[in-house]
Image (spheres, helix red, strand yellow):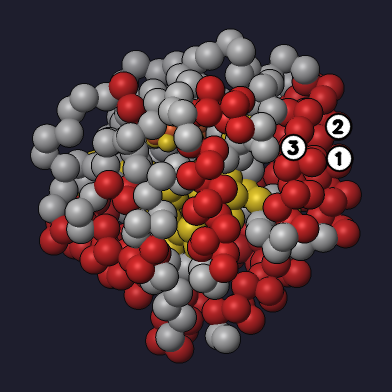
C-alpha cells in the first residue's frame, strides 16, 4: 500500500475534477495458468508483442494524464509477468491499484503485492471439488484459500472475488458470511459472456451450466446482500448496483446507460485501448491524452451509451457511478468499508 500525502492529494484532485474518467482495467498479459469454464482468455495463444515494462509505465503515465484515479491490473494472470513487481510499484505510486490473482501466484509474489492497495483472489465457492471443477485446475481451491489467509495475516488488503453463476448462486450468502466474519471483504462479479466478433479480446465464454436461469434467486440474492451490508463490513457492492441487477433479473429492464470511454476504459496486453473489452481497440494507450477529448471519442461515447450488449457488473458499476457525483456516491455507500480501509492504510 502506498498512500503518501502526494498520492492522496493527486487522487483527490482527479476524483473531484468534472468530466474525467475514474477507472481503467489493464489486461497486462494474456497468459494464464488456469482453465476456468467461464473464461475465454486462456484459450488465446498469441502472447508475442506484449508490452515491455517501459511501455507499460508510459501507458500508466498517459492514464494518469487523462485523470484515471483507480486501476485494476488483471489478465490472464498479471502475476505471471516477470516485471510485475516493478509495474505494481509504479502503478501504486499514482493510482488506487488493485491486482487480480486466481490464487496460484499471490503467496509467491507477496512482496510485490505489499505495494498494491488491494489484492483480489478469485474463489467461487466453499466447496473444494466444485471450485476446482469451475476453475479447471485441481488444487485451485486450496491455493486460493491459502493465499487469502496468508495475505490477510500479512496485513495486505485482500478480498475474495467470486463470480456469481447458476453453479454457486444458492451459496453466496453463506460464502459472504464466511469471509466477512473473518474480516475479509467480498467483491462480486456476475457470470456474463461475450458474443461480439470484433472485441478487444474475449473474456466470458458461453457456458450454459453457468448461465443464471433461476432469475428469482438472483433477485432474492440482491435483497439478501443489501441486508447483509447493513449488519456487517466487507460486502463490496453498492446499493445502486444491487438495485440495477435486481431490475435486470426481475423485469429484464436496464436502468443504466453505459459509460464506456467516459468513466472507464480497458487496455490490453499490447497497449491497445477500447471502451470495454467487447469492442475493438480505438487508440494506443499512449495516445489517450491527445484523443480523449476528441470529436471521434465523443462519437464513440454516444455509440457505447446506447449499447446494451453486456451486463458485466464492473461496467455496470462504473456506468451508474459516474462523474464526481458518482465517486461521492461510492464513498457514501461504502463509508463503513472505506473507513476501515483508510485506517489500515495509515496504520
Ligand atoms: S478467469 Fe482468470 S484465472 Fe480463470 S482462466 Fe480466465 S484469466 Fe485465468
Ligand atoms: S454495454 Fe457498454 S460495456 Fe457492455 S458491450 Fe456495450 S459498450 Fe461495452
Say above or below: 269 vs 342.
above
Q: Examine the rendered structure and indicate whether residue 7 appears above or below residue 39.
A: below
Q: Are marks 2 and 1 in contact (CB under 8 Å)?
A: yes
Give the quadrant of residue 93.
Answer: bottom left
Element carrying mark 2: helix
| Left or right for 296, reference 133 | left
Note whether residue 173 is visible.
Answer: yes
What residue sits right under mark 1 in the picture?
Answer: 223
The quadrant of the picture occupied by the C terminus is bottom right
Residue pictured at 77% horizontal, 17% vertical: 214
Closest to the observer: 98 or 286? 98
- Residue at x 32%, y 35% (from the top left corner): 32
- Residue 288 as seen in the image, left or right of residue 118: left
Q: Residues within 10 Å of mark 2 (few under 14, many from 20)?
A: some
Report whether the residue tagged 1 is closer than 8 Å to ligand 2.
no
Q: Using residue 14 as the reference point, say whether residue 64 is left or right of it.
A: left
Q: Residue at x 62, y 53 (%)?
A: 321
Please tell me the numbered disc located at residue 335. none
Residue shown at 79% from the left, 49% from the top: 177
Residue closer to the observer: 262 or 177: 177
Expressed as whole percent of the image width and height from the top left, the position of residue 237 reads 69, 50
Query: Mark 2 or 3 closer to N-term?
Result: 3
Residue that mark 3 sits on: 172
Residue assigned mark 2: 220
Q: Return the residue nearer the eye: 117 or 257.
A: 117
Which image quarter is the N terminus in?
Answer: bottom left
User: Is tag 3's residue or tag 1's residue first in the polypeptide sequence?
Assistant: 3
Label 3, ligand 1: CB separation under 8 Å: no
Amino acid at each position: 500500500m502506498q498512500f503518501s500525502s502526494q498520492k492522496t492529494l493527486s487522487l483527490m484532485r482527479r476524483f473531484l475534477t468534472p468530466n474525467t474518467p475514474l477507472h481503467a482495467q489493464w489486461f497486462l498479459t494474456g497468459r494464464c495458468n488456469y482453465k476456468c469454464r467461464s473464461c475465454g482468455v486462456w484459450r488465446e495463444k498469441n502472447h508475442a508483442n506484449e508490452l515491455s515494462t517501459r511501455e507499460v509505465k508510459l501507458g500508466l503515465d498517459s492514464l494518469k494524464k487523462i485523470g484515471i484515479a483507480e486501476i485494476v491490473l488483471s489478465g490472464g494472470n498479471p502475476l505471471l509477468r516477470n516485471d510485475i513487481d516493478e509495474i505494481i510499484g509504479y502503478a501504486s505510486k499514482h493510482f488506487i491499484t488493485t491486482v487480480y490473482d486466481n490464487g496460484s501466484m499471490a503467496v509467491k509474489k507477496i512482496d510485490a503485492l505489499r505495494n498494491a492497495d488491494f489484492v483480489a483472489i478469485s474463489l467461487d465457492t466453499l466447496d473444494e471439488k466444485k471450485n476446482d471443477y469451475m476453475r479447471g485446475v485441481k488444487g485451485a481451491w486450496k491455493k486460493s484459500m491459502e493465499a487469502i489467509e496468508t495475505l490477510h495475516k500479512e496485513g495486505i488488503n485482500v478480498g475474495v472475488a467470486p463470480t456469481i453463476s447458476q453453479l454457486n448462486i444458492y451459496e453466496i450468502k453463506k460464502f459472504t458470511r464466511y469471509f466477512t466474519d473473518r474480516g475479509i471483504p467480498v467483491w462480486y462479479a456476475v457470470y456474463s459472456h461475450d458474443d461480439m466478433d470484433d472485441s478487444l479480446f474475449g473474456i466470458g465464454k458461453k457456458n450454459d451450466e453457468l448461465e443464471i436461469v433461476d432469475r428469482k434467486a438472483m433477485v432474492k440474492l440482491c435483497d439478501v446482500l443489501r441486508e447483509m451490508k447493513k449488519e456487517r463490513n466487507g460486502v463490496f457492492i453498492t446499493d445502486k448496483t444491487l438495485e440495477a441487477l435486481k431490475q435486470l433479473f426481475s423485469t429484464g429492464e436496464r436502468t443504466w446507460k453505459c459509460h464506456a470511454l467516459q468513466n472507464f476504459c480497458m487496455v490490453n496486453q499490447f497497449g491497445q485501448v477500447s471502451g470495454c473489452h467487447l469492442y475493438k481497440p480505438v487508440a494506443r494507450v499512449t495516445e489517450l491524452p491527445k484523443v480523449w477529448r476528441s470529436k471521434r471519442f465523443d462519437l464513440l461515447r454516444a455509440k457505447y451509451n446506447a449499447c446494451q450488449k453486456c451486463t458485466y457488473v464492473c461496467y455496470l458499476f462504473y456506468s451508474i457511478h459516474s462523474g464526481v457525483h458518482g465517486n461521492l456516491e461510492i464513498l457514501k455507500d461504502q463509508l463503513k468499508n472505506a473507513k476501515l480501509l483508510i485506517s489500515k492504510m495509515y496504520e
